Amino acid sequence: MDRAYLKRRYLVSFEARRLPHIFTDVLVIGGGAAGLRAAIEAAKYGQALMIVKSAMTESNSSQAQGGIAAVLDERDSPALHVADTLAVGADLCDERVVEKVVGEAADHICELVEWGALFDSNGERFDLAREGGHSQRRIVHAHGDATGWEIIRALLEKARQTDRLKIFDHCFVLDLLTDPVEGGPGSACVGAICWHQRYGLQMIWARQTILASGGAGALWRETTNPPQATADGLAIAFRAGVTLADMEMMQFHPTALYIAGASRSLISEAVRGEGGKLVDKFGRRFMGDYHSDCELAPRDVVARAILSQMLKTAGTHVSLDVSQIGVEQFAKRFPRITEQCLKFGIEPGWDLIPVRPAAHYMIGGAHVDIEGRTGLERLYSCGESACTGLHGANRLGSNSLIEALVFGRQCGRGAGESLSLANDKLAAKDLSFVNEPSQRTEMDVLDIRNSLRALMWRNVGPTRTSERLAETLEIIDFWCRYVLDKQFDQPCDWEVQNMLTAARLIAASALKRTESRGVHFREDFPDTDPAWRRHLFVSRQSPP
Ligand SMILES: Cc1cc2nc3c(=O)[nH]c(=O)nc-3n(C[C@H](O)[C@H](O)[C@H](O)COP(=O)(O)OP(=O)(O)OC[C@H]3O[C@@H](n4cnc5c(N)ncnc54)[C@H](O)[C@@H]3O)c2cc1C
């Protein structure tokens, strides 16, 4: 097998002495909830530089709707939140991590309020919502369904007031720079090579680096994620030799707004929580055929039920009937969803909302310990690009924003504290790298991007089989041969190289896990196998 995805160490050739150099104590890659929180913390200890590839508002974090989970009611307790998280995680959660995140959650909500975040409340108490899988009301939300937007607004304002924190936006990180550790066997991360739309290629040298580059939803044709979620961080980490974990675990959300030709947007689970009913193309409510909890069954069950009903009725989608909630009440509780629907002439309450499942949240990522450290020296990771073990094989709704904040702060602190331990001096090294010129013909990269997304949806979606996964690997390997051997000079092409690499790892891991657990469902292995109560790891040194 030609493993093209293993061949490239760096996406572009470079010669250090010909490029501009920037020096910082801590480099943070990504400016969502995880990156912002990490950078604010790191700047307490030294110079911090945060890099984001597009505008600051374009991230999964700013799209988050439902809310952020924390124990804030006297009827609730950390033990209950821990138990709920473990129950959903299908025996793959790291209990110590769950206890850490749950234990620190309330403190992060208070901190956000201190920094100006306005959560929905009656003036004295938060208006706490309850979501599927949570035994108590513990979901803090803002402006009804704009929680992520409000959190990012508050964090960004805090970041802008933070001394020693610089932000570069529209700056694409291509790769982590690694250098052999003096006197040791391994390598350490010494920064990153990036491309700024105005200044071109630059080398950023950092004493510590934090990867907070978000998720991978854009690898699937149907996704709730914005188009920037192209799994760059996962591919970057893989090329640098970092071990990734649980790559087969992608959570699919049952209800994304389905308008053919338009990008999908999330219709929050809270809509079903408030009484929204799922009906098929004949107007028949069908969830009772699949689960006793009907519309409030676990996300993966609802997602598969919708796909099965679409197949049975030859429909392109099913619909949410929210007439019970009422037109005015719906608009008040879900202003962003209402706005989104109205753009397409759908008035929730009067009209049915067309929905179908979509890729939503990447559980797998850079394998980190409880302090957020990856296996590569001087590299931390947090947020959706990391795999901390909090979610196990399935994510409890509203647990990811809080994970991003808890591990963001942890990584910022860890990186900051190690600055005083290391006596290293920042200096540009004479790193250079030359890619062999391609011997193969060119392919249409945009077409491959679209075809890959269709393939991932068809074969590596909510239901999988060994036959379809094997076919996927064959096709991806073919594309990799023609795309990964080229040297491009634009982010849209580098993104496709990253998407192919990450998709390869995801499909291979999904093929390897011959059981169904949490979000990973194999039609040919529908049962959970106790022998598989373990994580799957992949790395350059030990490829799938
Ligand atoms: C529609 C939607 C609704 C959601 N609702 C909820 C919810 O209600 N509650 C909840 O807990 N979770 C929710 N989630 C999940 C949650 O929002 C994310 O898991 C979380 O925000 C991830 O934060 P992050 O900081 O890790 O990544 P992101 O917020 O995605 O940030 C990633 C950052 O990395 C940068 N980046 C990526 N690649 C590069 C590169 N090559 N170079 C430079 N920069 C790069 C991006 O520009 C961006 O700034 C939702 C997600 C979506 C998509």
Image (cartoon, grey):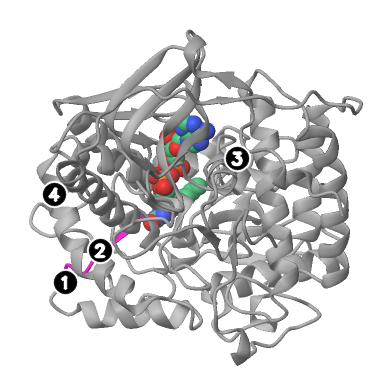
The image shows residue 280 at horizontal and vertical percentages of 73, 65
Q: Which element carries disc 1, helix, strand or loop?
A: loop
Residue placed under numbered mark 4 in the picture: 111
The image shows residue 310 at horizontal and vertical percentages of 79, 64
The residue lying toward the viewer, choosing from 423 and 250, is 423
Q: Are marks 2 and 1 in contact (CB under 8 Å)?
A: yes
Q: Which element carries disc 2, helix, strand or loop?
A: loop
Disc 2 residue crowd, few under 14, some 14–19, many 20+, Cα 10 Å: many
Q: CA distance from mark 2 to mark 4?
A: 17 Å
Residue placed under numbered mark 3 in the picture: 230
Q: Nearer the viewer, mark 2 or mark 4?
A: 4
Q: Residue furthest right?
A: 441
Q: Residue furthest bottom?
A: 530
What residue is drawn where x is 24% and y is 82%?
A: 79
Q: Which element carries disc 4, helix, strand or loop?
A: helix
Q: Is 437 placed above or below 417 here?
A: above
Marked residue nearer the N-terminal end (2 or 1): 1
Image label count: 4
Q: Is 525 placed above or below 530 here?
A: above
The residue lying toward the viewer, choosing from 119 and 502, is 502
Q: Tell whether circle 4 marks a residue whose Cβ is less than 8 angstroms from ligand 1.
A: no
Q: Tell whether circle 3 marks a residue whose Cβ is less than 8 angstroms from ligand 1.
A: yes
Is residue 71 in the magenta section? yes
What residue is drawn where x is 60% and y is 48%?
A: 217
Residue placed under numbered mark 2 in the picture: 128
The image shows residue 538 at horizontal and vertical percentages of 61, 61
Disc 1 residue crowd, few under 14, some 14–19, many 20+, Cα 10 Å: few
Region in magenta: 63-73
Q: CA distance from mark 1 to mark 3?
A: 38 Å
**Residue 522 in view:** yes
